[in-house]
Structure formats: C-alpha cells, structure tokens
Image (spheres, grey):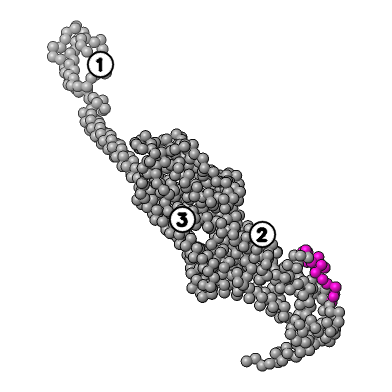
C-alpha cells in the first residue's frame, strides 16, 4: 500500500509469507509532511501446512511412505515371484505326483500281471498234472494186470492191454511235445521253417488220413479246394499239427451220420479278428455239425484248459486240454490267426488264416517236382491211428456191453467215462464178478442207471453232456436211483474237489492214477457193507431206518414203508398193490425200490417188518405166541413159527430164551 490514505487505520490481508517493513509519515492540517517516517518491521508467518517443520515432516512422511510403499511393492513382487515359483514347484510336484501315481499304477498292473501270470502258470501246471493222471492210470493199471499170473493166460486180453499202454504212452509223448512247444512259443524260440510246397495236395493227404475214421463213425468227410494246385511257402509241421488238432476235435464232437467239411482257398481280405496278417491270405476252415459252443464262450475257447458248463463241465478240446490254445500258438508262429464261429446244435467253424506267398515269388523252376513237397510225418500217422482206435472202441464196447447184458446175471456195475481206454480197463478189471454197463457221459449214464438199476456206479468227473458231479446229484435226488452207491474217479486231488464230490452224494472218491486192487476193494467193500446193513436191518429188531447210513431219499421211503406195515400190522391182506397206493408210488416203483434197498420182494419185506415186530412182542412176554401171530398179520400160529424160524434161524421160544441169556449174562 502506498500513498496518502484518508484514514488513520490500515488492514493488511492476504499477505504472502515473508519479511515486511511498514513506514508511516504523518501530515498536518496544513499538509505539511513529516520528513522522517515512522517505520516498523514485521514478518508474516506461513500457514502451518506450509511451514518448514511441517514440510520437513511431510517430506519425511512422504519419504517413509514411499519407502514403505516400495518395500510393500517389492514384497508383493517378491511374493508374486515366490508364488510363481511355488506354482511352478506345485506343478512340478503335481507332475511328479502324476508320474509317481502313473508309476504306481504301472507297478500295480505289473504286480497284477505277475500275479495273473503266476496264477495262469499255476493253473497250467495243475491242469497239466491232471492231464497226465489219466494216461498214467491207463499205463499203470494194465501193467498191474500183466504182472499177475492169471492175466497172462489170455493172449487177447494181453494184446488189449499192450494196445492201451502204447496208445497212452503216445498220448503222454504228444502232450509232452505240446508242452515243450508252448514253452518255446512263450520264450519266442519256436522254430518257423517255411518251405515251398503244393498246399492243396498236402491238405488233401491229411484229410484222407481221417477217411477210415469217418467211415467207422458214419461221418461224411468232405474236402473242398478253391485251387487245383496251390503252390505256397509254409511250415509243413505246423500245418499238419493244426489240421490234426482241428479235425480230431471235430470228430470228437460230431454225432454219427454227421458231417465234417474242410475248405481251402485264397483270399485278399483281412482276418475277422483284426490281426495284421499279410495280404493275400490262405484260408483254411474246418466245419462240423456237432453240439457247438455257446456264444458267451466264443472269446475264451482258445484259453488254455478252458472249459464251459453245459449241463456239466464240457471241455472244448477233449484230449489234451490245451489243443485249441496250442493251435493258436502254432498260428501265431506261422504269422497267422485263427477264429471260431458257432451256432450251437447247427454248426461250428474254425477258420485259419496264414500269409500267402505265391509260387512266382518262390521262383520254383520245376513245378512238376517242387522243393518242399514231402510225405506226411510219421507222427501224424500214429496220432490218427490212436485217435481212430480210441473212438471206434466206443462202438465196440457198446456192442459188447449190450451182448453181455442180455446173457449175464451177475451184479450190475455201471462204468462212466469219456475215455474209451479207461472204460476198457475198468470193464476188464470187474467183468469176472460183475455185469458191466458202459456210458460215455453223465447224460447217457443217468438214463442207463434208471433202466438197469446197477449195484454200483464208477464215474469220471470231467465229461461231456453232463459231468460226474451233476450225475451224482441227479442220481441221489432221484427216487428210483438214490440207493445206488457211487464212486467218483478224478485227476483232481485237492481237498475242495473231494469235498465237492462227497457233498454231491458220492460214496467214494478215488484219485487218478489209481491202484486197481484198491479200487476193487473199495467197490466190494461198499457193496458188502450195504448188504450187511440190509441184513442187519432185517434181523435187528431195534434198528430203525433213520439209523441206517443210506441216502435221505431212501431213508424217507423206508420210514414210510415201515410205518405203512405197522399201521396194518394185523391186516393179513396187506399186499404190494395196497401198500403202493398208500405210499403214493406205482407198484413197479415200489418193487424196484424195496428190492434195491432190502434185496427182498414187497411181500418178503412186509413179512420181515411183521417178524421184527413179533420179536419185540416176544421179548416183552405179555402175549402168547398165538396172540402175537394173529396180531402181526399171520393167519395161523404154525405159519408164523415157520416164517420166524426161516427169518431168525430159530423158533420163537428158542429166540426168547437165547435173548434172555444174553441179557442176563454179566458184562466183561
């Protein structure tokens, strides 16, 4: 502010911060101005937030905040980097965990594979052991006969035994060779020896070997080739073994007057199982109209020792138990494949595919006499001969069994086994003392048992149509056959197999290979014990039906029969007709059942029960002999005395005296 102001008051506002000097001059009324001004110095202080301390503090605060923010940002960045590192490590850990889990899964799979392989090998060797037992039995049993002096007198029987021994020795040799070749396949050491040859003629030669067997079995054997001459490179040994196994399998399953067809052709299509067989392809097929294979088992038929149940255990390849698996191994060795199609009861076709290498590629200069065209091996000749002898033996034994059955009155023994040699050995072992009937499987045996009512049955377990376990169950649950003792023969030796056999109702379980004398003893003992039990039941006045060691069906029947007689004890008119009507069976069923259990006719059985009751009354000494005779259904006392003596071997009076002496005798 400068100049003269008309007031003696000054107000300074909005002065900037700083140092100020205020000079004031006075003037009088005459306008005279004092030359010496009055002055004052003052300072305008800044606003607090503009003050230096504040600014310093603010700067310090800003610096601190900036530092802290920097530290925070640095820490956040560090945390982010650490988090990224952790995420990276986490991913690495997850990858490692995944790898560990994958390795663990792989380890589990390998352990499972090892266990499966171990179980498979265990089953393989267990089943191989079972397969060995039957041919070994069929070697040991004939040798046992040949060692005895009596068997040497019959030259015809000696020849039969020698034939059986030879066939089963060959069977063992074939099985051993197959096992060795399976081992070679697993170790990838099986030799593959292809050579040029005329395949069509070779296959025809193999088929022709079976022609005699086809005629014996009344089977139409047909061979069809799409090529008059098919020159190719192939392994002769492998093809012979494959076709032999397929044809023998077909003959074992085809019925009489059935058909087996073998086809050979070339094709450009791939095999149905998707394997990478080279094109073009040679296609073999073997078709039979036997019982067939259910669709649910088609994928498993090439597994070793696979069998499926069809009213019992039916082994797909009856013979070695590894036939179809062995064929598959041979096909793989030949860089081929095999498949099967089946319509049960209509037809089953096995189809083999192998690579076709044409004659031009072989550069055969002389097609009239090409290399590789050789005769069939001696092994296949021997194998077909043994197969033919084994199968034709079924027909011969059937005829012999029928002829013997018509003439022989000896006790009946039913032998059940799908191996004709085993039936022959068993027949020749027992034919001197028993009338022998034979059956190839459980179904045939069931019908034969119902028809012939044998004294005892000896049955194998593993058979077609119906196995021994199922046969045993059906026989023991059938009113007409429940009384027949059954001995099971089996190559299965484990405890659970024996338990299964006994639980099915078997009276005995004999392992293969078996001792013939021991088996004979078991058969004779079972029949003797049964006869002893019957005799005791008829003479022991205190023995009740439920105390007899017989099948539950028989026990119930005997209880009904005894109670029926007891209800009509004083009725002398009780006979077979009235008894059958009251029990609820036919007269024939009543007769057969009473005869099979007690060895008596119905009337004899009724008299036996009456006499047992009479014996009990005699011991009570409350009635006279005449009263007892009339109360037990006898028309006269003298008739009663006659029957009583015949039954107990003594008179009624002597019977009482003898038993009183026994009761009064001091115990030692």
The dot on residue 10 is 1
The dot on residue 382 is 3
Horizontal side of 313 relative to 15 (left or right) equals right
Q: Are discs 1 and 2 less than 8 Å apart at CB?
A: no
Residue at disc 3, secondary structure? helix
Question: From the viewer's perspective, is the residue at label 3 or at label 1 nearer?
Answer: 3
**Residue 468 position within the rendered picture, expressed as x and y whole percent measured from the top left:** 59, 61
**Residue 526 position within the rendered picture, expressed as x and y whole percent measured from the top left:** 61, 73
Residue at disc 1, secondary structure? loop
N-terminal of the pair, mark 2 or mark 3, is: 3
Quadrant location of the C terminus in the rendered image:
bottom right
Please say whether residue 143 is one of the residues in the magenta stretch: no
Identify residue for label 2.
Answer: 447
The residue closer to the viewer here, 17 or 275, is 275
Looking at this rendering, what residue extends furthest in the left direction?
36
The residue closer to the viewer here, 651 or 411, is 411
Please say whether residue 583 is one of the residues in the magenta stretch: yes
């Amino acid at each position: 502010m400068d100049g003269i102001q008309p007031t003696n008051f000054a107000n300074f506002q909005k002065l900037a911060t700083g140092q100020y000097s205020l000079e004031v001059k006075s003037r009088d009324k005459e306008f005279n101005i004092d030359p010496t001004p009055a002055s004052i110095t003052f300072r305008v202080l800044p606003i607090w937030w503009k003050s230096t301390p504040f600014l310093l503090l603010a700067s310090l605060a800003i610096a601190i905040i900036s530092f802290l923010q920097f530290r925070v940002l640095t820490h956040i960045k560090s945390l982010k980097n650490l988090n990224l590192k952790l995420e990276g490590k986490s991913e690495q850990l997850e990858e490692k965990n995944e790898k560990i889990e994958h390795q663990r899964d792989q380890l589990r799979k390998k352990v499972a594979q090892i266990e499966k392989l171990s179980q498979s090998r265990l089953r393989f060797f267990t089943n191989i052991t079972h397969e060995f037992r039957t041919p070994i039995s069929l070697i040991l049993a004939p040798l046992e006969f040949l060692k005895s002096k009596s068997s040497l007198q019959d030259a015809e029987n000696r020849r039969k035994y020698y034939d059986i021994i030879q066939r089963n020795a060959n069977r063992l040799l074939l099985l051993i060779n197959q096992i060795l070749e399976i081992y070679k396949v697993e170790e990838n050491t099986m030799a593959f020896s292809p050579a040029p040859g005329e395949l069509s003629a070779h296959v025809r030669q193999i088929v022709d070997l079976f022609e005699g067997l086809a005629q014996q079995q009344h089977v139409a054997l047909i061979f069809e080739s799409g090529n008059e001459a098919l020159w190719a490179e192939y392994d002769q040994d492998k093809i012979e073994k494959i076709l032999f196994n397929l044809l023998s399998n077909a003959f074992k399953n085809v019925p009489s007057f059935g058909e087996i067809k073998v086809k050979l052709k070339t094709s450009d299509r791939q095999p149905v199982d998707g394997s990478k067989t080279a094109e073009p392809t040679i296609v073999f097929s073997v078709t039979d109209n036997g019982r067939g294979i259910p669709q649910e088992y088609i994928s498993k038929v090439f597994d070793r020792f696979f069998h499926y149940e069809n009213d019992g255990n039916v082994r797909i390849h009856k013979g070695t138990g590894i036939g179809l698996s062995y064929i598959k191994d041979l096909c793989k060795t030949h860089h081929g494949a095999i498949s099967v199609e089946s319509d049960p009861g209509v037809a089953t076709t096995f189809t083999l595919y192998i690579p076709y290498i044409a004659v031009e590629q072989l550069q055969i200069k002389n097609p009239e006499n090409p290399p590789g065209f050789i005769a069939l091996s001696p092994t296949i000749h021997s194998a077909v001969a043994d197969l033919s002898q084994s199968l034709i033996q079924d027909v011969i034994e059937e005829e012999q069994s029928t002829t013997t059955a018509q003439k022989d009155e000896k006790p009946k023994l039913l032998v059940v086994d799908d191996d004709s040699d085993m039936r022959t050995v068993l027949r020749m072992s027992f034919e001197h003392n028993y009338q022998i009937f034979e059956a190839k499987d459980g179904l045939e045996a069931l019908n034969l048992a119902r028809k012939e009512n044998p004294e005892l049955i000896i049955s194998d377990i593993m058979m077609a149509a119906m196995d021994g376990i199922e046969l045993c169950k059906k026989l023991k649950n059938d009113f007409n056959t429940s009384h027949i003792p059954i001995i099971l023969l089996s190559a299965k030796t484990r405890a659970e197999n024996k338990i299964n056999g006994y639980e099915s109702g078997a009276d005995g379980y004999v392992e293969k290979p078996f001792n013939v004398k021991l088996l004979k003893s078991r058969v004779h003992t079972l029949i003797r014990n049964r006869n002893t039990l019957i005799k005791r039941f008829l003479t022991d006045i205190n023995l009740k039906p439920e105390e007899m060691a017989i099948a539950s069906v028989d026990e119930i029947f005997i209880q009904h029969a005894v109670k029926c007689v007891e209800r009509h004890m004083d009725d002398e008119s009780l006979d077979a007709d009235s008894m059958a009507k009251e029990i609820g069976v036919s007269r024939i069923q009543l007769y057969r059942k009473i005869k099979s259990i007690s060895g008596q006719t119905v009337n004899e059985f009724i008299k036996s029960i009456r006499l047992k009751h009479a014996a009990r009354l005699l011991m009570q000494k409350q009635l006279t002999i005449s009263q007892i005779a009339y109360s037990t259904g006898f028309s006269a006392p003298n008739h009663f005395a006659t029957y009583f003596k015949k039954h107990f071997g003594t008179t009624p009076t002597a019977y009482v005296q003898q038993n009183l002496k026994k009761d009064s005798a001091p115990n030692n």
